[in-house]
Image (cartoon, rainbow, N blue to C red):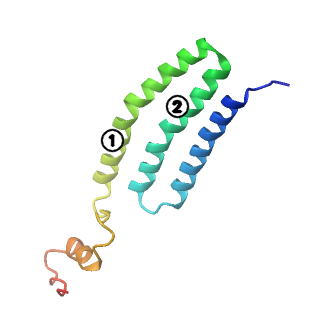
Amino acid sequence: MIAIHPIPAVLLLVGVAIVVLAGVGLIKLKTPYARIHAAGKASPVAFLIAGLGASIELGWGAAARLAVAGAALILTLPLAVHLLFRALHRTEPDFDPPVDEMVGTNADARRHRLPNDAPPPSV
């Protein structure tokens, strides 16, 4: 049986919990933008917390490799998420979620109406 220390075990479990919450967010969130946001924000945090736990347990050599992997993730993930957002925005021109959900239906109707449509009634 392999014994693991309690602090690395807690850190690994916290990292796993964050990944599970991000997975729930991918299933439950309605818009593709929100789904990408949930996955893009949770993955580096979960990796860094779990990597910290793994580096405590595995020693200096593994800690150095995990630090390099964490730095690469932190440096490249914002660009990757931005490119995903951009590709989504360019491929689905009809899907443009409202900036503020509290605006109401008139703003949505104004934004999505065709040029030949009559303007919506004012409130």
- Quadrant where the image shows the N terminus: top right
Determine crowd level at label 2: few under 14, some 14-19, many 20+ residues with C-alpha closer than 10 A.
Answer: many
Q: Position of residue 47 (x, y in %)?
A: 54, 33
Determine crowd level at label 1: few under 14, some 14-19, many 20+ residues with C-alpha closer than 10 A.
Answer: few
Side of 42 relative to 92 (left or right): right
Near-viewer residue (7 or 39): 7
Q: Earlier in the sequence, mark 2 or mark 1?
A: 2
Q: Secondary structure at mark 1?
A: helix
The residue sitting at the front extreme is 7
The residue labelled by disc 2 is 48
Q: Residue at x 36, y 44 (%)?
A: 84
Q: Residue at x 18, y 87 (%)?
A: 121
Q: Position of residue 76 (x, y in %)?
A: 38, 30
The residue labelled by disc 1 is 83
Total numbered badges shown on the rendered structure: 2
Mark 2 or 1: the one toward you: 2
